[in-house]
Image (tube, rainbow, N blue to C red):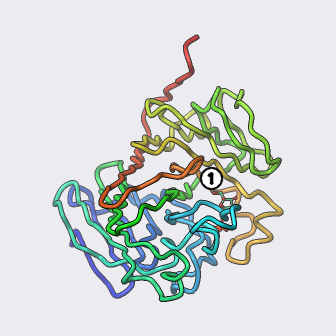
Amino acid sequence: MPVEELDDKVILTNPNDSSSKVTILKYGATIISWENKGEEKLWLSKAAKLDGSKPVRGGIPLVFPIFGKQKDSNHPTSKLPQHGFARNNTWEFLGQTNESPIIVQFGLGPENLSEETRQLWPFDFTLILTISLDDNKLNTTIEVENSGKQEFEFNWLFHTYYKVEDITDVLVSNLIDQNCFDQLIGESYIEKAPAISFHEEFDRIYKNINESKIIQVIDKGKVLYNLKRNNLPDSVVWNPWIKKSEGMGDFEPKTGYHNMVCVEPGHVNSMVLLPPGEKWIGEQEISIGGEIKVQSNIY
Ligand code: TA6
């Protein structure tokens, strides 16, 4: 069955390959599993809450309308929790829109939010998440519509947790020469590493990355994932490492930082301003395998 809707989740099965599936929790419209030819591609904590009691630790949580915590106490997002409310509210399953590749949609609006959240961020909006599962490919597209009478501004980010065998063998490439904000030291600088490697906590926001740059996750010379972005200029790269993992109650096993890396495309370095009646679209396209593609600025 290409699309199976259960009470709390929707399961997609690739019509061309029954061993390729995606499972989406309606809570947060969070993709919690992507099996490609029977192999899981996303990391999900063994202690991830899947009962709607808190945002999912792993998979692809959705970050809107604020990335992190808003520092400006006068900003409309200042009362919202870290990473906003898209990931901790239940979305509506809107149905299937295409057979092959299989495409489904989920929606979120003020009517899906608690009264408390609506008070915290009193804007009229519609979010439509489109998920497309194809051979060796998973696309997620978000459409944000301002359906109200007052403009609002927002961040968007796909908080994608990739599964890897051993983080110490992994490289994330094509971010050389990018301006980045290092969340750990609170400073910006130009990334000089031709490919990023991991040997401690890592938390950087890479800003205004040209869309031609394909961010690759490479393991021992083999391309695991290719990330293409449409209208998502920034990308966060995160690994919590030992201490941060120990500090997260829903991060299990505690050694799990060895088996994951987050590469999170979004619009987070600045806010998107959306006038009444306007729409904004952002897309991440994740493909499996292929050749290493070294992209550096040709001087
Ligand atoms: O995307 C990286 C990050 O902002 C890290 O700083 C860390 O806070 C991570 O998100 C997880 O945030 P969460 O609210 O899911 O615990």
Location of the C terminus by quadrant is top right
Q: Is residue 280 above or below residue 244?
A: above
Relative depth, front residue between 14 and 97: 97
Give the total number of marks visible in the rendering.
1
Residue drawn where x is 28% and y is 67% of the image: 105
Helix, strand or loop at label 1? It is strand
- Residue 238, x across and y down, in percent: 67, 52
Residue 29 location (% of width, % of height)? 41, 72
Q: Which residue occupies 42% across, 61% down?
A: 151
Image quarter hosting the N terminus: bottom left
The quadrant of the rendered image in which ligand 1 is seen is bottom right
Name the residue furthest top: 299
Rendered image quadrant of residue 123: bottom left
Disc 1 crowd, CA 10 A, few/some/many (<14, 14-19, 20+): many
**x, y percentage for residue 258?**
70, 56
The image position of residue 56, as x and y in percent, is 56, 74
Instruction: Name which residue type carries label 1.
Output: Val
281 lies left or right of 53:
left
Choose top left, top right, bottom left or bottom right for residue 173: top right
The residue singled out by tag 1 in the image is 261
